[in-house]
Image (cartoon, rainbow, N blue to C red):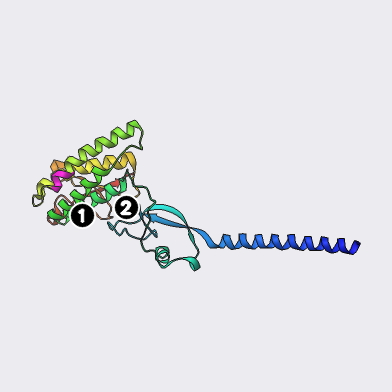
């Protein structure tokens, strides 16, 4: 009788032990199937994600907005997921639309500036129309009343100046006049809301009687958008805009 009871206890112990080991093995296996990886999205098209050095397939902008996702390990990745992990662009359906695109505004302003440095009136007009579209689609609903009023005032001024640049291809001086006004708008925007880009304020004393020759630049060199090839390097650096 004692032997039977002893055998029963041993059997129960072995069953419980095996079951516990199976659970631990399953948990370990499950833990290996997923890991956390960092992806980045486009400021303008947040549904487009990829590695930090990737570019948006929609607009070509750098992927700068950090997105943390959980994806399977390499053994379980599909071909599309493997491309995303290696740096290619991957679209997701669940990303929220960005309603306050400060970096996108700055980036498109810089496109206008760069076109003017090359005396490219048509290019400046195209970039201005793109910026006008961004301004029309932006919203400050997430801000408090004071900041919302400040942002809405910026948008109202900037849209007027951008429209003049966009509607006057071939009229370089007219575009540069309103680019000067837009530069002040963008400077105020960055001071109030910041930007992830490193940008500088440059100044040309030869433009606008020394009063209106300011602009924002992303380059280390001073390249003048008000005179282009005529006086390309006329001006000086004021400092970093923060």
Between 187 and 77, which is closer to the camera in this rendering? Answer: 77
Q: Residue 36: x, y in percent?
A: 50, 57
Between 186 and 3, which is closer to the camera in this rendering? Answer: 3
Q: Is residue 212 above or below residue 82?
A: above
Residue annotated with mark 1: 114
Q: Residue 98: x, y in percent?
A: 33, 46
User: What residue span does the magenta drawing correspond to?
Assistant: 162-166
**Residue 159 belongs to the span the image colors magenta:** no
**Disc number lying in front (1 or 2):** 2
**Residue 163 belongs to the span the image colors magenta:** yes
Q: Secondary structure at mark 2?
A: loop
Indicate the quadrant containing the C terminus: top left, top right, bottom left or bottom right.
top left
User: How many residues crowd mark 1 within 10 Å: few (<14), some (14–19), many (20+)?
Assistant: many
Residue annotated with mark 2: 45
Q: Secondary structure at mark 1?
A: helix
Q: Residue 116: x, y in percent?
A: 16, 53
**Label 1 – label 2 distance at C-alpha:** 23 Å
């Amino acid at each position: 009788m004692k032997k039977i009871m002893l055998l029963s206890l041993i059997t129960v112990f072995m069953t419980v032990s095996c079951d516990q080991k199976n659970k631990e093995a399953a948990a370990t296996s499950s833990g290996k199937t997923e890991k956390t990886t960092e992806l980045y999205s486009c400021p303008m098209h947040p549904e487009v994600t990829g590695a930090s050095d990737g570019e948006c397939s929609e607009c070509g902008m750098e992927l700068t907005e950090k997105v943390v996702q959980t994806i399977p390990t390499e053994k379980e990745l599909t071909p599309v997921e493997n491309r995303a992990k290696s740096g290619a662009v991957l679209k997701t359906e669940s990303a929220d639309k960005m309603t306050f695109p400060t970096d996108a505004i700055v980036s498109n302003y810089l496109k206008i500036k760069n076109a003017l440095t090359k005396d490219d009136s048509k290019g400046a007009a195209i970039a201005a129309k793109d910026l006008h579209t961004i301004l029309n689609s932006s919203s400050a609903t997430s801000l408090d009343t004071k900041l919302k009023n400040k942002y809405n005032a910026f948008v109202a001024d900037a849209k007027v100046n951008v429209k003049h640049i966009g509607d006057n291809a071939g009229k370089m001086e007219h575009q540069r006049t309103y680019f000067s006004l837009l530069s002040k708008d963008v400077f105020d925007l960055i001071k109030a809301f910041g930007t992830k880009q490193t940008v500088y304020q440059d100044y040309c004393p030869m433009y606008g009687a020394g009063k209106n020759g300011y602009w924002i630049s992303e380059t280390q060199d001073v390249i003048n958008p008000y005179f282009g090839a005529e006086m390309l390097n006329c001006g000086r650096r004021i400092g970093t805009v923060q």
